[in-house]
Amino acid sequence: MRVIFMGTPEFSVPVLDGLVDAGHDIAAVYCQPPRPAGRGKKDRPTPVHARAAELGLEVRHPVSLKGAQEQADFAALQADVAVVVAYGLILPQAVLDAPAKGCLNIHASLLPRWRGAAPIHRAIMAGDAETGICIMQMEAGLDTGPVLLRETTEIKEQETTVQLHDRLSQMGATLIVQALERLPELTPEVQPEVGVTYAAKIDKGEAQIDWSRPAAEVDRKIRGLSPFPGAWCEIGGQRVKLLASRLAQGQGTPGEVLDDALTVACGEGAVQLLRLQRAGRSAQDPDVFMRGFPVPKGSRL
């Protein structure tokens, strides 16, 4: 098929590669514009932009698709379908209607659960046992369109957002290729009204750990916010990111370090910290971290 690809972050890159490998004709790649990044604050292309350039594909990065000229340029590509995955701009109705077979979205949840911006983070933080990928026909509402294909996967016990992100990205790449191959035979499944939840964008203000909460909740927050924005607490007066953890045996005053392996008491139970990062330093395992920054038993976080 003649495909317009619309995506921006690293999550979208395997999908673009999958479409190219499957032999589809990529009419153009749409992504967010380059933005200042790094110490020099120079404009840096997005991961999708960089990959599309490597593949020799035309890249477009309008700041909006609301203008008549942008919509005319989109329609002029005469695509069979648009594939959208973590693009970052709202698609007006004129854009949704332009491809002959419409716009298909790859969404990283089991719709209608976790519509919205941060479905992977929210699924882990909520303690969901499973999640998955849905291929959805796009309409004007936020992730409300009918689902063409879905695939489920278990959320593993110690899995972080970045680990689940990478698995779901590969699943999405495989499933969209299947969807395009089978498009004429697929029956759209209208999303039920029961079970709708919204995955609000992650706010940095929710990243501080409250040790008075149950250990299961603390563990899910640490894993769900890893690597960005990163759950954090103060250790010895310094803010430290907590990037991996697991449930552990033990009890004590909330925030109390119970042993030399960085097991920390919570309101109920305890968690062991498995990956930590001080400001300006790389992430470290507990033994390496404590060689340069001791945290003795009995300390309070």
Image (cartoon, rainbow, N blue to C red):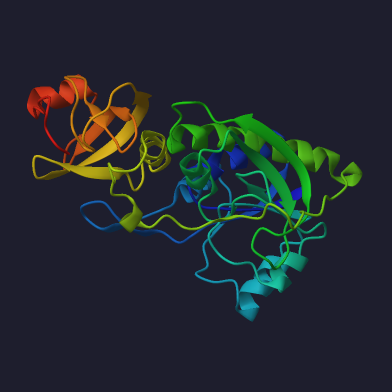
Question: Which quadrant of the view contains residue 234?
Answer: top left
Q: Is residue 219 left or right of residue 297?
A: right
Q: Is residue 258 left or right of residue 59?
A: left
Question: Which quadrant of the view contains residue 254?
Answer: top left
Residue at the location (46% across, 57% down)? 201
Residue at the location (27% across, 41% down)? 211
Q: Nearer the viewer, residue 35 or 155?
A: 155
Mark count:
0
Q: Is residue 278 left or right of residue 206?
A: left
Q: Inspect this view and state whether residue 65 appears.
A: yes
List x then y, in percent, for residue 27: 68, 53
The C terminus lies in quadrant: top left
Q: Is residue 201 left or right of residue 30?
A: left
Q: Nearer the viewer, residue 268 or 239?
A: 268
Residue at the location (20% across, 52% down)? 39
Q: Nearer the viewer, residue 233 or 90?
A: 233
List x then y, in percent, for residue 284: 23, 27
List x then y, in percent, for residue 85: 60, 50
Furthest toward the bottom, the residue is 68
Q: Inspect this view and state whether residue 23 appears.
A: no
List x then y, in percent, for residue 266: 29, 36
Placement of 112 over or under 270, stated as above or below: below
